[in-house]
Image: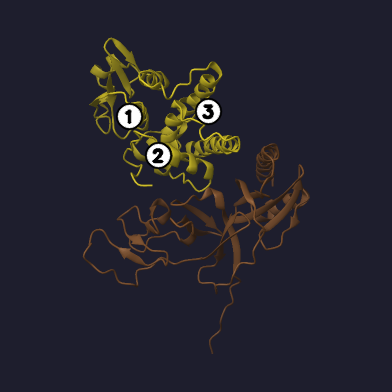
Amino acid sequence: MILHNYDLFENCYRVRLVASCAEVALELINVDAFPGAEEKSPEYLKLNPMGRLPILEDNALVLRNLSAILIYVAEHDIDKRFIPDEAKDRAQMMDWLGFACDDLAVAVQARAVALLDATGDVVELRAQARTLFRILDDHLTRQSLRGANFVAGDAPSLADLALFPAFALSRDFNLDHDEFPALRLWARRIRLLPGFITMPGIPDYH
Amino acid sequence: MTQTVEVLSQWVPIALSNMIETGTSAGVVAKGAEIVVWRDSSGVAHAWEDRCPHRGMKMSFGFVRGDHITCLYHGWEYDQSGTCQYIPAHPEVEVPKSICVARYGVAEAGGLIWAQLPLGSDESSFAGLPAMEGVKSVYIDASYATVLSVLRKQGCADGAVANVMILDRDGATMTIGIQPISNAQCALHITVPKGCAGDVRESILDWSEELRRSIEELEVVT
């Protein structure tokens, strides 16, 4: 499995984090995305006409959609840790995976505007990300009241791993962690998972 | 003749006790003051100015190791008295005792961590509250005055100490610690007596989210 990767892109980190926790080997091809914009070169546009990273290749299979990539990697986990078997549990996991990959795209964009010269209104994007963090903080407070430590149950799932980077990197676009105590406790639990890895902007310590 | 300006000191709740686990730190703001609250390995809570004396980095971005807190930036390490004990770039240097982080008076009571404001207040002991358990900290984009008036309309009564209100709801007596953050933001730290049933706690969560929504709508209109 080959990941076309740029270390500072949050969405590439999501794939590396899932692969590391699921013990799935990834071959990394590092792309000069910033400032080189290599993912928009003619060669890369053949792989992904949208001109975006990450791209996952497995022989003839080419995946460009973030949740498709994350699910494909997690399904290669020998122990099947991160995708629940039972239909309802899996659906709840997918619900939060959608929140992570679709809704929280505003947080990815806010960070890209703040750090990587992307275009957008960082004030508005930050406000939207804050609203989403509140929803997640409210949800995790309810979960812990029911004895569940993670977003879709008492075990960490693919959704937790996909959600973590947006919160862990939010200080990059000036959204601090003060207001989200339940998220802070949950993030600490994610950090303790076997195979957990960081990226620049997420300290190793804690 | 010198005139002394008396600054009223007061105890402000800054976090729910159960949200600051042993060995962790968090940043909070109370009346505009940036504070790091952290809990050392023996379970004791600390509230300090959220600023490393070295380069001004927020200590709340740092990490707790044993009974010390360490700045994320250059690893300067401070003991429970706020005194710098170790500078990694100069491991052989005996650190001057003058390198200190300013500390707030801190207390833990009623399921809440309290800081005494402003910095440099004469340390007075905290009055004390019955043991309670934290349910949720709710952060609301509204002034202290707005939040207080809405709580009063909901039937909240003044608590035993300042910055605390009591509300009976769904058969539980909530004690709510109120943290003024800025002119435009407040936090409510909601606690219930130990043994309060799970469904009551859930209904309190519903209530708190609705309260936040209604107050913020009010604040937009006015």
Kind of residue indicated by mark 1: Ser
Determine which quarter of the picture holds residue A190. Answer: top left
Of helix, strand and loop, which one carries label 3?
Answer: loop
Q: Which residue is mark 3?
A: A152
* Mark 1 nearby-residue class (10 Å; few <14, some 14–19, many ≥20): some
Kind of residue indicated by mark 2: Leu
Letter of the chain shown brown in the rendering: B
- Looking at the image, residue B139 sits to the left or right of residue B41; the answer is right
Residue B222: image x %, image y %?
A: 69, 47
Residue at horizontal 36%, vertical 42%?
A202
Is residue A120 visible from the viewing direction of this image? no
Q: Which residue is mark 2?
A: A192
- Which of marks 1 and 3 precedes in the sequence? 1
Residue at horizontal 44%, vertical 67%?
B102
Which of the two residues, A119 or A184, is positioned nearer the viewer here? A184
Residue B91: image x %, image y %?
A: 23, 62
Subunit bearing disc 1:
A
- Looking at the image, residue A75 sits to the left or right of residue B133; the answer is left
Same subunit, tags 3 and 1: yes
Of helix, strand and loop, which one carries label 1?
Answer: helix
Q: Any mark on residue A150, and which?
A: none
Residue B178: image x %, image y %?
A: 64, 55
Which of the two residues, B52 or B142, is positioned nearer the viewer here? B52
* Name of the residue lying farthest toward the bottom: B1
* Mark 2 nearby-residue class (10 Å; few <14, some 14–19, many ≥20): few
Q: Any mark on residue A20, and which?
A: 1
